[in-house]
Amino acid sequence: MPKLSYLKALNRALGDEMTRDESVFVLGEDVNFALTNVTAGFLKKFGPDRVLEVPLTEQGFTNFATGAAMAGRRPVIEFQIPFLLLLVFEQITNQANKFLMMSGGQRSVPVTYLMPAAGWRAGWGAQHSDQPYSMFAHMGVKTVLPATPTDAYGLLTTAIRDDDPVVFFGPLAALTVREIVDYEDLRPIPLGSGRIHRSGTDVTVVALGHLVHEALQVAEDLAEEASVEVWDPRSVYPFDWAGLAESVSRTGRLVVFDDSNRSCGMGAEILATAVEEMHLTAPPKRVTRPDGAIVGAVPELDAVLQPTKEQLAEAIRTVLKSPGW
Amino acid sequence: MPDALGFYRTMRFIRRFEERAIELVRAGEIFSGIHPCIGQEAVAAGACGALDPDDIVLSSHRGHGHLLAKGCDPGRVLAEMAGRVTGIDKGRGGSFHPSDFSAGVYNSTGTVGHGAGIAAGIAWAAAKAGEPKVVLSFFGDGAVTQGALLEGFNLAGLWQLPVVYICENNRYATTLPVETAVAGTITGRGEAFGIPSSDVDGQDVEVVHAAVAEAVARARSGGGPSLLVMDTYRYHGHHTFEMLVRLRYREQAEIDAWKARDPLDIQAARIDPADRDRVDAAVEAELDEVVRFAVDSPRPDPADAMDHYYADGFRPRPGVSL
Ligand SMILES: Cc1ncc(C[n+]2csc(CCOP(=O)(O)OP(=O)(O)O)c2C)c(N)n1
Ligand SMILES: [Mg+2]
């Protein structure tokens, strides 16, 4: 069976949707030459009307996509760098995402914002290393963060077919992940459906994005000490609260492993909701980035600023040792 | 194309609609207040009069005139402003963000200048679908210092899209005079992107109509976008909140000078006074009905507050879980 990489999964999902639905088109910078490989082969296959090379005009082309969506198309915008999503934060959250409501349900804006390289870029500096998925969840924009090629395929497909704006974060550190798959098994994955990557009985680790893979290694490393469940929400908005509650109802203990900044990040929301609404037998913990930014330029500094496996192992031990509330 | 009397009627309707709306603001029926377009009626009537029913309008915060001139049901527009469920957006757009797809009004963005890129996207999609539609995108002089507007111009110029950009230069962005905000000229901004651009007398509806009709014809035949800068003036405050706070950013003499070129008077001089009286009376009678419809329409049910947030019916979590 073939090996599917994360990037190939994106290329395949987008290509399949463009083949299936004439109204889908992709726009972005350097899409003609497929700088990121997501649009590899598309110009030849779909032509310049459906592979739209745009100038460096992010607010302009994000609004443009909103207009095209109002007129019946399904644009997929490929963004090169996470901060570009901040440059168009207004256009996504205020123009596109509120439009259905403001129009009293007359017309939705089915745009997909595809960020296929989110998070730390070794050596590229502070400005290229953000991981802003929590901000979109905060603003109520549907936001997905798949960890594996199969989930990337399934959630990109769903994002494109969804009638609302959806932001897709592909974590840079997960792009090298490969999976042996049968192409026949690839299918859409509903938004707001979490996934248990590894079952356990002592503690639930909610891991997001590429941190799923690190959490799985930690769970394996700790296998002698504890039975760790690794649960991946896959979409941060909507969030599978019922799925998390189910896991926590079995384990009673919770650690969140989240690449967001600490203040107001997904980790904070997950802990708050679990404490308010779920039955935890001991205080939970989160492992996140620090408040604010990471340095981005120097591996030694960034290694201590990003959530690490060592921190996760430590947090799991602390939560397991806790005598309770 | 509307005849001389038709233009007068549209402008008279817009003016009296706005005046009735201001009464409803005072009466507390229009909770939000409004941005009245009184003084600028010729731009709305002349520009929208140059469109076909299938053409598309993107409006601004000062947009009631555009909606009425484009053919939206006036009762439902007023109901929208008054937050009633019979409004064109079920009361969820309000005076500020109305849209009415049945009349081709796609959007009224509150982010000044950001309709320009949206207009380009609509025009591109229509052109690629082989539909001979033209998009009119309205904005004020305050928008021309907004980068996103210029990005929209660039895309429209680059891809020769069927958009007519209409800048209503009413001399002020809230309290800020245009001379103190804009380097160079407004038409120069269009020209920089290869977009045919011109200044137009925005107080004469027939002049507005001729200029827009030419730009629409060019756009429809594949000739690309245009920028028309309408010299005009608003008589009232920026927003009805100015009825409460007296802001002295312009002289009465200036307001009077503009009123001496009132768009309704200019057009009235071209029609028979008896026709004018007849139209004025008919407008009043229609507006009585419009106001009654809006005021008598039901207010929304608070239980529906989270309707229409998402197309698939997904409902966000409420602010508290007890
Ligand atoms: C991008 C942006 N900046 C500021 C505002 C606040 N604001 C709303 S209307 C307005 C003035 C707009 O002036 P202009 O574009 O000339 O339109 P006019 O009100 O004169 O019709 C301002 C500053 C806004 N809504 N959007
Ligand atoms: Mg102005």
Image: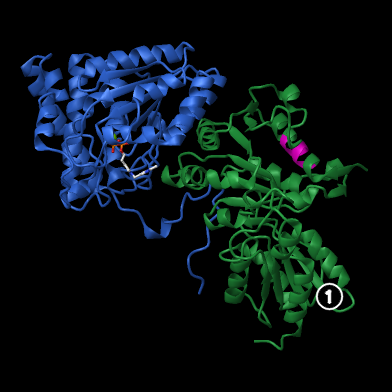
Along the horizontal axis of the image, is B268 left or right of A121? left
Say if A29 sits above or below A154 in the image. above
The quarter of the rendered structure image containing the N terminus of chain A is top right
Specify the colour of chain A.
green
Q: Position of residue B123 (x, y in %)?
A: 49, 24
The foreground one among B277 and B119 is B119
Along the horizontal axis of the image, is B308 left or right of B112? right
Residue beneath the point at 76% across and 85% down: A321
Q: Position of residue A22 (x, y in %)?
A: 65, 27
- Residue extent of the magenta highlight: A9-14
Asked if the magenta segment contains residue A47, the reply would be: no
Would you identify the image quadrant in which residue A319 lies? bottom right
Q: How many marks?
A: 1
Judge: label 1 CB < 8 Å from ligand 1: no
Along the horizontal axis of the image, is B294 left or right of A267? left
Viewer can see residue B53: no
Viewer can see residue A253: yes
The quarter of the rendered structure image containing the C terminus of chain A is bottom right
Along the horizontal axis of the image, is A194 left or right of A239? right
Specify the colour of chain B.
blue
Residue beneath the point at 68% across and 31% down: A30
Name the secondary structure under disc 1.
loop
Asked if the magenta segment contains residue A10, the reply would be: yes
In this figure, which residue is indicated by the disc labeled 1?
A227
The amino acid type of the residue labelled 1 equals Ser
Q: Position of residue A144 (x, y in %)?
A: 66, 51
Q: Position of residue A258 (x, y in %)?
A: 68, 63
Write down which quadrant ligand 2 falls in.
Answer: top left
The foreground one among A232 and B252 is B252
